[in-house]
Image: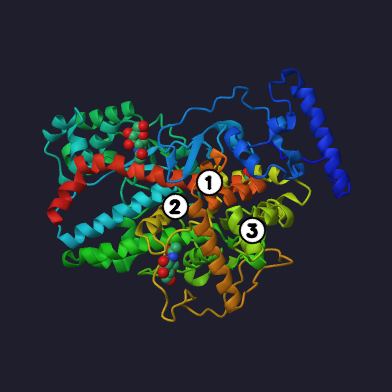
Amino acid sequence: MPPYWNPCSYLPRRLQIVASLTTFILLCFLFLGSTSREDTDPYLDKVPFGSQIQQGAHQVVDNLPKLPNVNTPQWLNPFRAPAHTPPPEQANSSSGEARWYTDFKWRNPFSSSVTLDEQRAVLPPLPDRPPVYTYYDPGAGRKDEHMKQTEQDLLQIWRRAWWAQGFKPVVLGRPEAMNNPLFRQVQGLQLEPELDLEMMRWLAWGNMGSGILSNWLAVPMAPFDDPLLTFLRRGEYPELTRYEGLENGIFIGSRDAIDSAIKAAIAEPTIKTKKSVVEALPGKAFRIDSNNGGIAFYSTGTIKEKYSAISAKLSNPSLIGEGLAMLTELINSHLHTIWQNTFSSGIAVLKPLPEHSTAMIEPALDLARNLTQCAASPIPASCPPNRPRCKPCVSDRMQIHTPPVFRNTSTLFTIATVPHPYTMTSLLHERDDLSVRFVRRETARDQWITAATKELLGTGLSSFSRLVSVKDAVASDYGAAHSLWLTAERPPDKTSEKDLEELDFIFGFTLPRTPTEDGKSEDPVPRPNREKPPSLPPTDFGEGMVLSGPQLEKERSLLERAKMLLRRAGSTRQIVGKQSSNPAARMRGVVEAWNLADTEAWKFVRAFNARRRLERRKWEEDEDDFLGKGTWDRWVDKII
Ligand SMILES: *[C@@H]1O[C@H](CO)[C@@H](O)[C@H](O)[C@H]1NC(C)=O
Ligand SMILES: *[C@@H]1O[C@H](CO)[C@@H](O)[C@H](O)[C@H]1NC(C)=O
Ligand SMILES: CC(=O)N[C@H]1CO[C@H](CO)[C@@H](O)[C@@H]1O
């Protein structure tokens, strides 16, 4: 939906308001006059929030000047549901205070125009994650515990990397292979151990049906929009395909194609002398694709050729565990490097209203610092097998910017912190005792969203139409791959394993978390002659602004108190009962009603993040079924 444009914006402010209001009321009569209901006041009927809060908010803000609402897009909204019944609750659509409703109409500026419920944000449908399977047999070969632990770490890297790229990784084991009706026939063949393992992979894969079969040393290592990854995400694999140069790292195919390939291999008279399925099948059994740039496969051959320090360890039976541990670190550092190379302009830690948001963006800045660090690596200057010309972190350090405005640059990763309007108002006016009167008389509406999108959308638009762009930046495929949106009140908790793991699964690698010797996350290697990365156009204000100690302390404590008040207020649903006895809830309701667009943005981000956490938790629960049936459990039994 294109942003709307206020045709009156060239008029002086007062005239503008009068003209817009007149237009609005006329339009209301035009479009809605004939369907007039009991409500005699056409304006009240149209305020853009759900019916419940509408009453509550009117109690609280009954004599607010209502003018700034004239741009409410309700009457422009072609999707507006004619019925006045809220859509049904969907399964798993809440987490804590956050509630959401998944619908294609998510780009509507106001969720409540779809959900008729102030608390439910409308999110885009979750993209389908095509499954990618790997086969892991902990029993294969004789291994010590340390080695198994390292293999588990490698599997974890594999799972994280595929998850972050929009897939659903599934680790299969021997039980899945045994479940395949062709298992007995394969067993009867007495194959070479190498081919036997390979056949088990195929049997397990065939048992699951169409999909991707990946070696657990084959990980996606490319920008989100890489052509191979984009193709794989589509989830359609009509032909049995392998990839040039990736050996048995990755195959795709439909269930029928997999089955007939296994049958053909079994029927092959010379199969006992073969070492792999590819070798056992005639050449034309596979389509061979050369579009292979998105995946890095750390095969034995590749390790020998490119990472000799590791291959030296792996070829000595008593040092294999150590070699695998090095490989774990190497692959993680390569994933991090490729991520850094993708965002060559650096990281933008969004800082609108910079005079008052230093404390607010501290968690985002901490995250950005860790992301720009160089990951520990046994071979620091190395590149992944699929990107021999990468720029290793040690020679090309990523930059951090703190622009006051959101920029949509494809080579810039944005970390944004969206405050609740109560928090923002409290910080802007440096007071924590906001009153209804003060909010109405002294504060401007929707300051955060207006400031953040000033460059992207100019100054002439209403805050409501800005929501469309912000929602796009948060939740579209493109937006989600180029930015991370946090809420100021619940940033990732540095002391919580869960939150840190969540970040790892968003980025697809483990972030560096060990401070450097001086306690700061600074550049470990001095590099006098490095090239400067492409710099962004300078901003005329805010960037690099630093607060002095006491000021910063004051801001931090205001922020803490705002968080506390919001927690006390709980959900604004409490104020619907008109005379809310909870003054915090009442105050929160007033501020939310005054800053509709900022509130909507905040709720949207909160719901988006909550749903993302829930999606992953659900996958891990589902995966337990496989791991429980298969490898993980038996293997954990052995370790304990
Ligand atoms: C940012 O740019 C991309 C590609 O140029 C575009 O698809 C997207 O809609 C833009 N996002 C916003 C918020 O303007
Ligand atoms: C960033 O690194 C520091 C140590 O330098 C660590 O304490 C902190 O938890 C890390 N934060 C995140 C979000 O990874
Ligand atoms: C993670 C989670 O809450 N999962 C639930 C989703 O909804 C189904 C049925 O509605 C439940 O069975 C799950 O437990």
From the viewer's perspective, tell me whether residue 424 is left or right of residue 134.
right
**Structural crowding at the residue carrying mark 2, measured as other residues with C-alpha within 10 Å and reported as few (<14), some (14–19) or many (≥20):** many
Badge 3 element = helix
What residue appears at the point 23 percent right and 35 percent down from the top-left corner? 203
Read off the residue under disc 1: 225
Disc 2 to disc 1, how far (Cα)?
A: 16 Å
The residue lying furthest to the top in this view is 34
Give the class, few, some or many, for how many residues have Cα within 10 Å of label 3's Cα (few <14, many ≥20): many
The quadrant where residue 273 appears:
top left
- Which quadrant of the figure has residue 204? top left
Check if mark 1's residue and mark 3's residue have beta carbons within 8 Å. Answer: no
Tell me if 340 is positioned left or right of 500 in this view: right
Figure disc tally: 3
Q: Quadrant of the N terminus?
A: top right
Depth check: give the residue in front, 479 or 534. Answer: 479
Q: Secondary structure at mark 2?
A: helix
Label 2 residue near ligand 2, CB within 8 Å:
no
N-terminal label among 1 and 3: 1
Identify the mark at residue 425; answer none if there is no mark.
3
Give the residue type that dot 2 points to: Ile
- Residue 39, percent across and down? 69, 25
Query: Alpha-carbon distance for marks 2 and 3?
Result: 31 Å
Residue that badge 2 annotates: 506
Disc 3: residue Cβ within 8 A of ligand 1's nearest atom: no
